[in-house]
Amino acid sequence: MIGRVHRTRRRIIDLLHLVLMGTATTTIVVFLIWIVAYVITNGLGTISLSFIFSSERGIGIFPMVVTTLYIVIASLTIALPIGIVTAVYLNEYSDKPRVVHFVRTAIETLAGIPSILYGLFGLLVFARFFGLGQSILAGGLTLSIMILPVIIRTTEESLRTVPQAFREGSLALGTTQWQTIYRVVLPSALPGILTATILGIGRVVGEAAPVLLTVGIARNLPRSIFDSGRTLTIHLYYLTKEALNPEDFQIAFATASVLVIFVLVVNIITKTLTTYFRKNMER
Amino acid sequence: MVIFVFAQGLAPFIFPTAPSVEVVLENIPSARINDLLYENYRRAISLDPEAEYLKIEFPRELQDHLSNPEHLSYTLSFPGTLPGLKSRIHINIPEPPYSFPMFMTGREWRPVYRKLYGIFPMIVATLLSTLGALLLGTPVALLSCVLIAEFLPSRLSLLVTSAVELLAGIPSVVYGFFGLMIVVPGIQRLFGSASGSSIAAAIFILSLMILPTIVTIGVTAIKSVPLAYREASLALGATKMQTAWFVVFTSAKSGIVTGVVLGTARALGETMAVILVAGNSPQLPTALTSSVRTLTATIALEMGYSAGRHNEMLFSVGIILFVLIFLLNGFIMRLRGKMLSEVSS
Amino acid sequence: GGRSEAGGPAHYTIEVTGSTSVSPLMERFAETYSAAHPQVTINVSGTGSGDGITGANTGVAELGMSSRSLRPTELGFGLDVLTVAIDAIAAVVHPDNPVSDLTRDQLRQIYTGEITNWNQVGGPDRSIAVVSREPGSGTRGAFEEVLGFVDLLVAGAIEFDGTGGVRASVAGNPNAIGYISLGSITDEVKTLDIDGVPATGANVASGTYTIARPFLVLYRQEKIASETDRFLEWMVSPEAQAIVERNYVRVN
Amino acid sequence: MEQSPAKFAIKDLNLYYGVFHALKTVNLEIPDKKVTALIGPSGCGKSTFIRVLNRMNDLICDCRIDGTVRMGKTDIYDTTTDVTSLRTAVGMVFQKPNPFPMSIWQNVAYGPKMQGLRNKSMLNDLVEESLRRAALWDEVKDRLKKNALSLSGGQQQRLCIARAIAMQPEVILMDEPTSALDPIATKRIEELMGSLKRDYCIVIVTHSMNQALRISDKTAFFLMGEILEFGDTSQVFDSPRHEETRRYITGHFG
Amino acid sequence: MEQSPAKFAIKDLNLYYGVFHALKTVNLEIPDKKVTALIGPSGCGKSTFIRVLNRMNDLICDCRIDGTVRMGKTDIYDTTTDVTSLRTAVGMVFQKPNPFPMSIWQNVAYGPKMQGLRNKSMLNDLVEESLRRAALWDEVKDRLKKNALSLSGGQQQRLCIARAIAMQPEVILMDEPTSALDPIATKRIEELMGSLKRDYCIVIVTHSMNQALRISDKTAFFLMGEILEFGDTSQVFDSPRHEETRRYITGHFG
Ligand SMILES: Nc1ncnc2c1ncn2[C@@H]1O[C@H](COP(=O)(O)OP(=O)(O)OP(=O)(O)O)[C@@H](O)[C@H]1O
Ligand SMILES: Nc1ncnc2c1ncn2[C@@H]1O[C@H](COP(=O)(O)OP(=O)(O)OP(=O)(O)O)[C@@H](O)[C@H]1O
Ligand SMILES: [Mg+2]
Ligand SMILES: [Mg+2]
Ligand SMILES: O=P([O-])([O-])[O-]
């Protein structure tokens, strides 16, 4: 019932689409390689062990590395438990549809709010109102609110993919709901939770505006979470903004390379861990 | 959180800046104001709101230098050697509450001395750059979504997806940096304009930044479309491409919309990268090469330097951003609701 | 600031917050001072002049930094002010730009939009890309004030929120003109003479180069600890001013 | 054959999914130490019914239940009944094998552990015994630490049975345990049921008439949410009381 | 009965999933305008075989095929064969109903539209006729714009059949089309097949002996990837040549 003409036309159209898609994807990949290559080729010359592990001005970025780690740990320590518990609540105990709907809407809204507004909020509430000043704690609290939607959504997605059969199997053995969640559901959702964590880390590490407003740019090695500090991203931002010495741009490139490499490593770790867990689960 | 920002940001439209007229002496050892002598006084001197006139008597040596007092409306200054060490008298007349319509429609943002807070150009710039980024980025993202999820062999697909995820994890400052060093000069050369810092550069960088968001979420959505739909379509003699667009893509619509929405939110909220490439002039754009300033950029640029009403006004800008996001969310919920009801009823 | 519970000689932390242009200098101060006084830690946060002034006023930080003179409202807080350095502001162009001297008037006219092409000031026929700082910047405030065009910046001017951005933008664009702190000049850009006077520290000190602004430290004399007081004194000592001299103009 | 005491007594059971009336006034007595088969066309409510017996339907939010279900003396839908301990006493094997994504050993030990059994050697013994009884021990004894998901479908099904036995329940419910299995695995599981019924009350859902005939003592025929016929298997298959039963059994529908 | 010409001629077909040998040297001739039933225990390769006929296995990456499959004169596994037009000629109804998440009308019109048929009134006619033939028209004529997923399982299955008919294929393949259906829907679909076989070649996979007996002209019995027995349905059921066939048919396994 179909003409040869139509079939040929279809083939041409299909080919055209394929070419368009190929162009689009190539564009994306080319820009990715360009950005990464641009940053790393300019920065690699400056990177060395002493660059990462020295605190001395003009030589090393150790304080920034430490502050970044502090911030990551602080915000994850706050956001992960809250996020996971919320996701579990939404997904496993959703017997109050109103509450669930409200919480979901709130999360959707939170997810869309520009990060600078989180910064304003953190500045007003944590730094000024609660008197934490610009500190790692204030920043960690702010960022943890910011990554909460990411963690909740991703965790929820992975909880949703845990087959109902696992829950039924466990409950049918006379376990309580909490035992079931803790022993069967959460472990199965682990890869997803891991992805959430990594996405959260990426967001925390990459964020500039809210960190600038709540953590500050103190260049010292922080000694506690009540100290102010400067993250790698802020360092990079600051170097491009206030470049005081000619070599600052070199350092900026090197810092950017460290950031890009960090993101790369985090991505590789996620991928590996996820495939590892998947393999463990499926075969 | 909403409450906090709102509380701070609504104040300038309700309250005047100060309860009464104040006089501030800068580097002036002594003066007599309304017959009271102030010596080495460094705090604001609040006047009685009932007072009908203001009489200031300066020390002799300053009076000799008094010149041309009206060139700055509220400040009388005396020639001195170095900035910061000048002798000046400031008379702070409380400003009335700022008019909200003027805030929304005003074309001029001169926050420091002329106290003009018009954000209309910034609203326009924010909307235009977001829209532009969507128009430029979405088709590219969607096309490659389909290619990655449906046509690439699984190894290559995994590789490209990982690469795109890497793109998603790169800090926005790095994008801004790249934009400043590569895109901005490129645009200047391309258009032959005075400068390359422009709305075009912002759109370009933003579209680059929303690509990974849309692609990652879109690919996940497309991959989660049941195999059964593909089989059904292929079994009906549709080509792979027809199947991809008419069945798979349509079924993944809801997820893809989520991706586009999150991308839009990212474009709307992006700050650091935009600051580095957009030029930040608070003017209405007239061409692609016009330098523009977005709402988020204004907050980030001025928060650290602002004081008093200027500071509160930045929170007001935050409120406008909130409202934009709420509108966006509402619109999406509508859209998604429509799509869901389309599917279920 | 606060004393830590750790043993040994009482440890003291001085919190300094404020202007981003002052903070590089302050960090150098902090390093040198802490090296000589190990019991004192100095935390420098650069967030902006406004924040520094507010911080010192509300007591969030012991010391505030500002790269501009205080505004009337802020003067009313009654803060004590210490000027630790003077920073000259230099007008800069791309090294390929043949123009090397402008009058104050020409400079002002460029920034207010009355002059829009380089050929009006003896350069090639190219339109001028005006690069400025964001409103509220100490550098911009001083620059506009000294040249007398406060709040009259031409509408299409590009605004960057930092010295580095302005410099990179000028370095990458042969049409551009910008202004940056004297301490941040590199050979990527060319410094313009103003009325025939080169922008140098000596000329600022002698008063012939007038585009300058102070670096201020703000505090409340009655609230600060003795350690902080000693640090304040030290900042205007010859030792500290020698550090200032490397990039800025000393105050005495 | 009627002498064995009733394990479950169901009276006037009505079950609704939202507005859909899935079980209609069901009355039934399920005997102990026997195999009771539930047969009937697809969608008639067999799974729904079997899930009533261990309150698995509690998990479905819009499911509503009327009537009484007694196990021994306790009304299992009484508000004071502890669901957890009910499910401890009533084991269930699902239609699709659903081992946990853990090792074989952990799968079997999971239930007893959750009940508080911590003693490692006792657990080991229990795991071995359960696997032996589910006719799986010989095949897996060398790889107890391996992930249970790497087992074949039939092995997984037997693992689920072992997991249920390890709890030493009083009742075992099986929902189409062999529908997805090859002939050999099916045979093994049928043999197992034959040996298990000495100790347990077994309820099994099956789509295969032949299986029902081979293994069950009692048969209940469901049609559109009602129990149309219930009696000794031989009687139901040889001389059904209803025309529909006869037609279903002889393959005229379903 | 043997006079009708062969639609499919399968010669020495071997199929591997990776290293797993799923179909072993299958030889078969499937007649036109007849119903051919494929029976056999779970996992024996029925679905795999039926998917060979419209090259649906191409979608599975590690699937490898040996031997020739001819439809009429064309070798369908020849590299020059256009898979798309092959599938246009060979319709398929899947085991699980899989309507697209679009309206009922769009579901049926999808295939012809993809072939380039744009004329709205012709499409309307085609949709109506196909739905009528699938015995669904009366139930859905008032809600053609409604989403197909809101139909009941049986209706969905009939919709999928209508969708396949709308393409006016030469062959219809059905993989357990009634396994999830209630008796009434099953009966409808069986009647439909009876009327369809006048025009089409029909191949059906079923787990129900009774169904095979009721509707098919030819029956192939699969066991472990081999065709153990093939012949007229009456002969296969009444006097099977193999002991295994007899045992399977009489319910001694599966
Ligand atoms: N969660 C549910 N919500 C609404 N209706 C349901 C639900 N579960 C089952 N039903 C309906 O209840 C009826 C009985 O379902 P049930 O699963 O008990 O059938 P069954 O006899 O086990 O069938 P099968 O042999 O196909 O497994 C069916 O019509 C089904 O559509
Ligand atoms: N994609 C695949 N990869 C590997 N093995 C497969 C795949 N699909 C099917 N098999 C295996 O091939 C064999 C035949 O499968 P097939 O689906 O054809 O069985 P079937 O006869 O249709 O069974 P059922 O009656 O349960 O549908 C089975 O052992 C199955 O495990
Ligand atoms: Mg069932
Ligand atoms: Mg099958
Ligand atoms: O950063 P500044 O305030 O010195 O412009």
Image (cartoon, coloured by chain):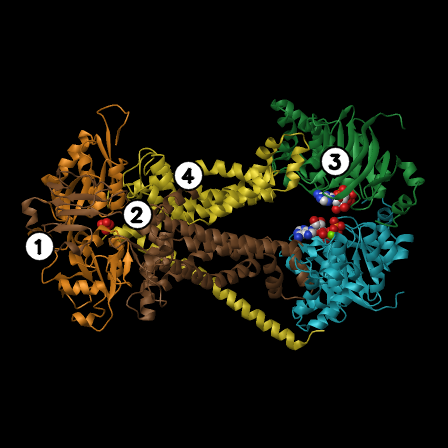
Chain colours: A yellow, B brown, C orange, D green, E cyan
Q: Are marks 2 and 3 in contact (CB under 8 Å)?
A: no
> Alpha carbon of mark 2 to alpha carbon of mark 3: how far?
64 Å
Chain at numbered mark 2: B
Q: Which residue is mark 4?
A: A75
What is the count of numbered marks? 4
* Marks 4 and 1 share the same chain: no
> Alpha carbon of mark 4 to alpha carbon of mark 2: how far?
32 Å
Along the line of sight, the residue nearer the viewer: C174 or C14: C14
Give the vertical position of A211 relative to E229 (above or below): above
Q: Residues within 10 Å of mark 1 (few under 14, many from 20)?
A: some
> Alpha carbon of mark 4 to alpha carbon of mark 1: how far?
50 Å
Q: Is residue A256 left or right of residue A161?
A: left
Residue B335 position in % (x across, y down): 56, 56
Does dot 2 land on a helix, a strand or a loop?
helix
Q: Which residue is mark 2?
A: B309
Chain at numbered mark 1: C
Q: Is residue C26 visible?
A: yes
Residue D38 position in % (x across, y down): 82, 38
Residue A183 position in % (x across, y down): 58, 33
Residue E12 position in % (x across, y down): 75, 61
Q: Which residue is mark 1?
A: C203
Chain at numbered mark 3: D
> Alpha carbon of mark 1 to alpha carbon of mark 2: how far?
38 Å
Disc ID at residue D65: 3
Q: Residues within 10 Å of mark 2 (few under 14, many from 20)?
A: many
* Marks 1 and 2 share the same chain: no
